[in-house]
Image: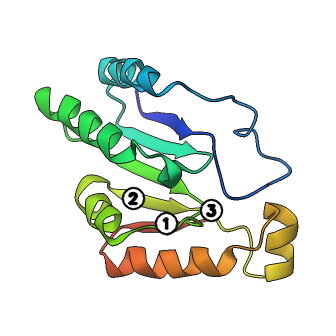
Amino acid sequence: MKNLCYESKSACLLKCPYCISSDNGIMKEEQYLKIIDFIDNLLPERLVISGGEPLLDSLLKEKITLINKKYNEKNKESYISISTSATSNIENDMWEFLKNNIKCFDVSIPTLNHDVYKMMRGNDLLDIALINIRKAIKYGLNVNVD
């Protein structure tokens, strides 16, 4: 399998009117182990962890660590990408973790105009996203902005 997208958390700080993640309900935390076993059976070449906002997931480090472990046990290298709005507060220890455990930090920014951003995203968190993009670059992450 080439690519697989895993929605780790439906929660998000934005209120995009077109969002499809917000109506997916709440996954019980213990269910993620079944999903990671499913990922382990497929071993996609690229795994995109998305949401909502995956960086709001309190278990994100645990999930990524377990996924990487599953790949390593099969002598495979994982390619994990985080798909984010980059609008949450990201602590230094999370930046260090991401630098060492993912391959790509994908940030979705539809515009650099604050009024249009607020109209599209429900909240104007553009400045926070831009700060986090700079931090991601500072920490040496492979950043993709689209």
| Residue 13 image point, x, y percent | 67, 58
Type of amino acid under label 3: Ser
Question: Based on the displayed image, in which of its 4 quarters is residue 109 positioned?
Answer: bottom right
In x, y percent, where is residue 94?
Answer: 34, 62
In the image, 38: left or right of 25?
Answer: left
Q: Residues within 10 Å of mark 1 (few under 14, many from 20)?
A: few
As drawn, the label of residue 75 is none
What's the amino acid at mark 2? Cys
Return the disc, 2 or 1, that comes first in the chain's sequence.
2
Disc 3 secondary structure class: loop
Q: Residue at x 36, y 22 (%)?
A: 33
| Quadrant housing the N terminus | top left
- Above/below status of 55 relative to 57: below
Helix, strand or loop at mark 1: strand
Q: Amino acid at mark 1?
A: Asn
Residue 22 position in % (x across, y down): 73, 40
Q: Is residue 13 left or right of residue 57?
A: right
Q: How many marks?
A: 3
Q: Which corner quadrant of the image does residue 143 belong to? A: bottom left
Horizontally, is 106 left or right of 15 in the view? Answer: left
Report how far apart the C-alphas of labels 2 and 1 lie in the structure: 7 Å
Residue shown at the point (69%, 30%) measured from the top left: 24
- Marks 2,1: beta carbons within 8 A: yes
Residue position marked by numbered label 2 in the rendering: 104
Mark 2 residue element: strand
Q: Residues within 10 Å of mark 3 (few under 14, many from 20)?
A: some
Residue placed at 18% from the left, 34% from the top? 69
Q: Nearer the viewer, residue 75 or 14?
A: 14
Mark 1–mark 3 Cα distance, whole angstroms, equals 8 Å
Residue 108 numbered tag: 3
Expressed as whole percent of the image width and height from the top left, the position of residue 129 reads 59, 73
Residue placed under numbered mark 1 in the picture: 144
